[in-house]
Image (cartoon, grey):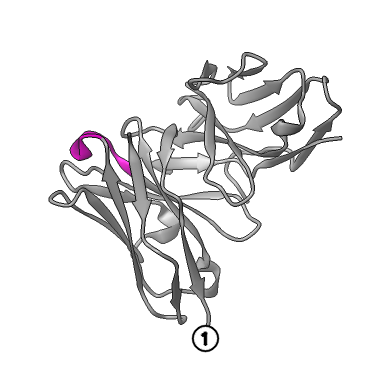
Amino acid sequence: QVQLVQSGAELRKPGASVKLSCKASGYTFTSYYIHWVRQAPGQGLEWVGIINPNSGRADYSQTFQGRVTLTRDTSTSTVYMELSSLRSDDAALYFCARGQGARASYYIYWGQGTLVTVSP
Amino acid sequence: QSVLSQPPSASGTPGQRVSISCSGTSSNIGTNTVTWYQQLPGTAPKALIFSNNQPSSGLPDRISGSKSGTSASLAISGLQSEDEGDYYCASWDDSLNGVVFGGGTKLTVL
């Protein structure tokens, strides 16, 4: 069965960086795009970016341009999201999700989420 | 401020029909398909409707989606207590070159 398993909760200080992982299993890793979506406490969903696991090409929300980097390791079927220069408003639950296409907003499979806390 | 506009709340009594709207622009809903999600507290969103009106596997037929122009709508008939939760619409935006979400609608079953 398809699974996306994310890394555990992280605590960082403002200005630091964090790197989250999303390990895929149960399907051909390079056949589906992976999107990242975040949700601040009590807030709505916000799209972060997308990576093509086959080519490694990534695109990002303009909100995060320059601060976020998506990479993948095809040998371990894992996608990574690194967010730098963390601010208090980056504190959120970060989800990875498998997209049904490059321009898709339809995600059937989601990771369980990784909580990022930003505190001095 | 979300790119797609949804009412912050909706409510109904068991058995009633409720509708949740999602308003966008020509660069998102007007051009691309809409997905609807339900999110329960502490869990990842669950896709209900994709491609504007296509039900996800196992979705009861009392839940449906539609789209007209730059707006979309999710309808739930025969409201049940299990329908309580937060509902989000989503679409690709050609101008922003990314996925945009609505701000979410909290559905309460009275």
Q: Is residue A70 visible?
A: yes
Magenta range is A27-34
In this view, the residue farthest toward the front is: A1
Total count of labels: 1
Q: Residue at x 32, y 31 (%)?
A: A101
Height in image: A61 above or below B8? below
In the picture, measured across the screen, residue A54 lies left or right of residue A33, that is left
- Where's residue A22, x and y in %? 32, 53
- Where's residue B53, x and y in %? 54, 17
Q: Viewer-proximal residue, B55 or A62?
A: B55
Chain to which mark 1 belongs: A
Q: Which residue is mark 1?
A: A120
Residue type beneath disc 1: Pro
Height in image: A40 above or below B50? below
Height in image: B87 above or below A70? above
Q: Viewer-proximal residue, A37 or A57?
A: A37
Is B93 in the magenta?
Answer: no
- Where's residue A43, x and y in %? 63, 55
In the picture, measured across the screen, residue B7 lies left or right of residue A58, that is right
The image quadrant of residue A98 is top left
In the picture, measured across the screen, residue B79 lies left or right of residue B62, that is right
Q: Is residue B94 visible?
A: no
10 Å crowding of disc 1: few (<14), some (14-19), many (20+): few
In this view, the residue farthest toward the bottom is: A120
Quadrant in which the C terminus of chain B appears: top right
At mark 1, the secondary structure is: loop
- Where's residue A70, x and y in %? 28, 56
Is A31 in the magenta?
Answer: yes
In this view, the residue farthest toward the top is: B61
Q: Residue at x 45, y 58 (%)?
A: A63
Q: Residue at x 52, y 67 (%)?
A: A91
